[in-house]
Amino acid sequence: MNNNGRGTITTFVAGLGIGVGLALLFAPLSGEETREWLMDNAENRLKRIRRQGRRWMFQFQDVLDKSEDRGNEGTKD
């Protein structure tokens, strides 16, 4: 019964091979298509993050402008 873990390693490697084979067999896209999809996805998410950052900056600037206007109302002669 004591085989120094060789059976466990063999079983793991066999399972890994079967998993990789099934993943390749049932993959919806080729490697190149998957890379393109990942890049497009990353670019789209980056654009969305930038747009949201710009919106927040505009909103923050509006809040600052409004608070500055309120502060100046009390100092008018």
Image (cartoon, rainbow, N blue to C red):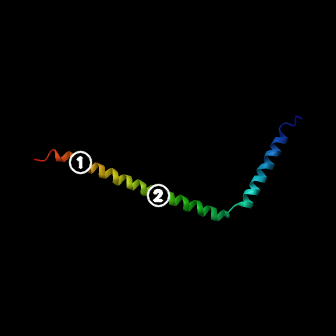
Q: Residue 68 carries which label?
A: 1
Question: How many neighbours does mark 2 have within 10 angstroms: few (below 14), some (14-19), or many (20 or more)?
Answer: few
Locate residue 47, reporting x and y percent. 47, 59
Where disc 1 sits, the SS reads helix
Q: Quadrant of the N terminus?
A: top right
Q: Is residue 75 left or right of 23 when viewed as pictured?
A: left
Residue at image point 49% right, 57% down: 46
Tag of residue 33: none
Residue type, numbered disc 2: Arg
The residues tagged by marks 1 and 2 sit, at their Cα atoms, a distance apart of 30 Å
- Residue 57 in the image: x percent, y percent? 36, 52
Residue under the image location 34 percent in, 52 percent down: 59
The percent coordinates of residue 41 (x first, y second) are: 55, 60
- Which corner quadrant of the image does residue 23 belong to? bottom right
Q: In which quarter of the image is residue 58?
A: bottom left
The residue tagged 2 is 48
Q: Earlier in the sequence, mark 1 or mark 2?
A: 2
